[in-house]
Amino acid sequence: MTDLGLELTAIHKRFGDNHVVRGLEIALARGEIVALLGPSGCGKTTALRMVAGLETPDSGTITIAGQTVKSDAVDLPPEARRIGMVFQSYAVWPHKDVRDNVAYPLKLAKVADANARADRALELVRLAGMGDRFPDTLSGGQQQRVALARALVAEPSLLLFDEPLSNLDAKLREEMRHEIRVLAKQVGITSLYVTHDQPEAFAVSDRVAVVLGGVIAQVAPPSEIYARPASLAVAKFVGRLSILSGITRVGASRAKVQGFELDVTSATDATDVALGVRPEDVRLTDAGIEGRVKRATFLGERTELEIETEAGVLRADVAPGVAPDAESSVRVALDGGRLYAP
């Protein structure tokens, strides 16, 4: 028995002249949650739909829990792949009560105890006792829990999530991303989670696969994706990043910016480099790099500054009470950064 819950090998997909997925490869351990994170049009949803059997790859192999479901010789239909899928739009039937919505895949398969199993799935998602209600009496978060219970009820080998929280408000998104992770870990089902929302991907997953231009640019735990992006393209996409030019490299772990040396990490051996700096690594100081505040944006718990320097524009987060006004002259120190080939 394989320890892999899902494996994609050399997956390609074209729509006409548009090569959407370009040799995508990834393997998920059993019970692991991996988020496919990327901008619109990068190929992440197409990849998910190919795993589900809703799109057909031009080439490559898809294996779920040790069973090949798509290859040159095999092409199992969606209903034979033992997957559960949670959609962005909930996809609950308004004319069916909650129990019937959840039990639907079991009743299609003529499972005798469909209603009892549906009630157990509803207990898992904290909707016990709501089986007789109809979807229009539920909140958006409750309807998404119904969709999650329906995905779980047939005890699938793999759960697929397609932007499942996009239709919820910010507070509900925070609650549901935690609940989805806890529940997926509780039941131990391998999960592939597609989203463009970075905090959501970080909160839900064990690993994040950043998809750019139809390929996986980096796959790693969320903290590593953020702190040690493998390339400038990943660094620009993940989080907020300032790029400084005119950098002098001073050995493997130091660089000089406007005459000020600082400790850095590096993603390149090149001598011609750019420096990526996160807002939390920029602080106001009495002696440091000179700049001028282009913009100060109050965001509640912090004020975001854009500071223009000779090397480029820096973003910095400061407490609202100490934020300088726009057009103020300031000095900043950099507490870290990462070198990239420009």
Image: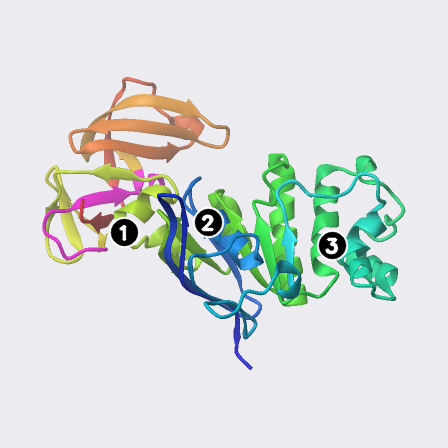
Q: Which mark is residue 44?
A: 2
Q: Is residue 174 above or below residue 206?
A: above
Element on which disc 1 rests: loop
Left or right of 321? Residue 123 is right
The magenta-colored residue range is: 267-282
- The quadrant in which the C terminus is found is top left
Q: At x 75% / y 37%, what residue is drawn?
A: 139
Quickly name the residue at label 3. 150
Left or right of 331? Residue 167 is right
Left or right of 147? Residue 157 is left
**Image quarter of residue 69:** bottom right
Q: What's the distance in space between the residues labelled 2 and 1, CA to CA? A: 19 Å
Q: Which mark is residue 221?
A: none
Q: Is residue 298 above or below residue 126?
A: above
Element on which disc 3 rests: helix
- Label 3 amino acid? Arg
Tell us which disc is closer to us: 1 or 3. Answer: 3
Q: Determine crowd level at label 1: few under 14, some 14-19, many 20+ residues with C-alpha closer than 10 A.
A: some
Query: Residue 186: image x %, image y %?
Result: 67, 65
Q: Which mark is residue 231?
A: 1
- The quadrant in which the N terminus is found is bottom right
- How many numbered markers are drawn? 3
Q: Determine crowd level at label 2: few under 14, some 14-19, many 20+ residues with C-alpha closer than 10 A.
A: many
Q: Determine crowd level at label 3: few under 14, some 14-19, many 20+ residues with C-alpha closer than 10 A.
A: many
